[in-house]
């Protein structure tokens, strides 16, 4: 006979199911989202303190330097700096897509924290269609911000 707590054919009913993993404490479950939030907060604090509008603090975008084309990330540091200082119009003017990304990150973090507190695992399965959609949005944003009629999106 199988010892108690073991799993296998000796269990009543012949079920081949493994035992449930031990429940993790709330503090341990909060470790990953807490570390993520701490890292992002530290990055935003640094960018909020060290002004990207002053030359020499951060490297220049290589695509912009060598081709003159604004990439989807151009203006992202200036956007983060303005966002930290509560200047939403300046943040949107520097990189509107980055501000949308800040909002999406915030919403994802809220969902992650709620699921962690409830003890539900966070599973983020992104389909290939969504990845292609994100790529298309980035490409369209890059194209429009580099054309004369999209100059409002340029940093």
Image: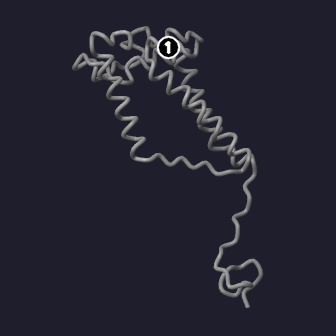
**Residue 137's spot in the image, x, y percent?**
38, 29
> Which residue is pictured at 44% across the width and 47% down the height?
127
Q: How many marks?
A: 1
In depth, the one of 139 and 155 nearer the eye is 139
Residue sitting at the far bottom: 1
> Which residue is pictured at 42% across the width and 41% down the height?
130
Question: Which quadrant is home to the C terminus?
Answer: top left
**Residue 118's spot in the image, x, y percent?**
74, 47
Query: Can you say whether 122 is above or below 34 in the image?
Result: below
Q: Is residue 38 left or right of residue 57?
A: right
Q: Is residue 127 left or right of residue 63?
A: right
Query: Can you say whether 89 is above or below 142 in the image?
Result: above
Q: Residues within 10 Å of mark 1 (few under 14, many from 20)?
A: many
**Residue 21's spot in the image, x, y percent?**
69, 64
Q: Secondary structure at mark 1?
A: helix
In depth, the one of 59 and 116 nearer the eye is 116
Q: Is residue 135 left or right of residue 63?
A: right
Question: Which quadrant is home to the N terminus?
Answer: bottom right
Colour theme: one colour
Query: Can you say whether 12 is above or below 150 in the image?
Result: below
> Which residue is pictured at 33% across the width and 17% down the height?
145
Which picture quadrant has residue 146? top left
Which residue does the numbered mark 1 point to in the structure image? Answer: 91
**Residue 144's spot in the image, x, y percent?**
31, 19
């Amino acid at each position: 006979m199988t010892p108690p707590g073991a799993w296998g054919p000796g269990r009543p009913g012949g079920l081949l199911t493994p035992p449930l993993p031990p429940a993790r404490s709330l503090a341990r479950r909060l470790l990953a989202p807490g570390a993520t939030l701490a890292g992002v907060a530290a990055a935003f604090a640094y960018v909020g303190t060290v002004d990207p509008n002053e030359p020499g603090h951060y490297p220049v975008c290589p695509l912009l330097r060598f081709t003159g084309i604004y990439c989807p990330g151009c203006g992202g540091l200036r956007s983060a700096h303005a966002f930290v200082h509560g200047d939403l119009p300046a943040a949107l003017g520097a990189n509107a897509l980055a501000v949308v990304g800040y909002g999406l990150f915030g919403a994802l973090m809220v969902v992650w924290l709620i699921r962690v507190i409830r003890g539900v695992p966070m599973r983020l399965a992104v389909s290939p269609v969504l990845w292609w959609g994100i790529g298309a949005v980035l490409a369209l944003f890059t194209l429009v911000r580099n054309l004369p009629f999209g100059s409002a999106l340029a940093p």
